Image (cartoon, rainbow, N blue to C red):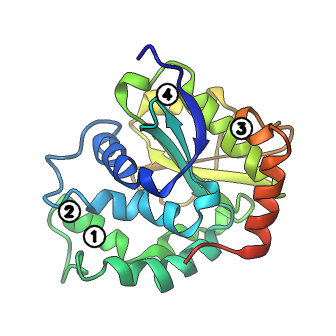
Amino acid sequence: MNRTAAVRPYRPADREALADICVRTADGGGDSTHLYPDPGLMPALFAEPYAHLEPELALVLDDGSGRAVGYILGTADTRSFVEAFRAIWLPRVRDRFPEPEGEPGTPAEEMTALLHRPERMIVPELAGHPAHLHIDLLPPWQRKGHGRELMRAFLGVLRLRGVPAVHLSMLTGNVQARAFYDRLGFQVIDVPDPGPLTYLGRSTEGVEPTGWAGSGGRARERARAAGTEGRAT
């Protein structure tokens, strides 16, 4: 913890660390190991597809030794992401996580059913906030300003790419997460029948790139490349 942590772009070597962070924060911010027999389920749903399909928008918090201890992942366009998820990502994982038959009866079956329904991410009320994100940090790295740093870097990259606004969904009962998002300017987006979720969004207007994202024009070069070359397959 005495090392200097910093935000940096995701690297393929971070994949295992991303999966671990996802598992250890997927139960309302706590460890979800006891809920899902296959530890790969939650990463396959909420972490790995973003790093695979849009690595240019995957950022990690490096603890100073090269190890990722937090991340922010997302997409610049939810509708396009959903199409790529079904066409590219789902075929890679459906054999490991086959779609449940009938009504899901366990947390694992519920999450697996979500995996097979990426179209659930397309919500008409969110059309004005085309990007969306997921952010998680291991507990020892929370409440130290690192989440704010990750968010500002991510919003800065979206801004450079001309994305006007971003949304996220969170469990309504997670009051600590809600306070964090409130401080960052996120506001409630009214969605009919949201279930246990609250949808929040904010504009990217006025966000200035920070850290690696604003140094030496590298972020602009990365953004241009992402815009012209498309997502990784």
Badge 3 vs badge 1, beta-carbon distance below 8 Å = no
Front position among marks 2 and 3: 3
Question: How many angstroms separate mark 4 from mark 2 (CA)?
Answer: 34 Å
Tell me if I can see residue 163 in this picture: no
Label 4 sits on what residue type? Gly
Q: Quick one: SS at disc 3?
A: helix
Residue linked to disc 4:
64
- Where residue 49 sits: x, y (%)? 46, 66
Task: Please name whichever residue, 137 or 220, is drawn nearer the observer in this view of the structure.
Answer: 220
Front position among marks 1 and 4: 4
Q: Assess disc 4: are there few (<14), some (14-19) or many (≥20) residues with their C-alpha within 10 Å of its C-alpha.
A: some
Q: How many marks?
A: 4
Residue linked to disc 3:
212
Task: Please name whichever residue, 217 or 25, is drawn nearer the observer in this view of the structure.
Answer: 217
* Residue at 55 percent of width and 69 percent of height: 53
Front position among marks 3 and 1: 3
Q: Assess disc 2: are there few (<14), some (14-19) or many (≥20) residues with their C-alpha within 10 Å of its C-alpha.
A: some
Sequence-first disc among 2 and 3: 2
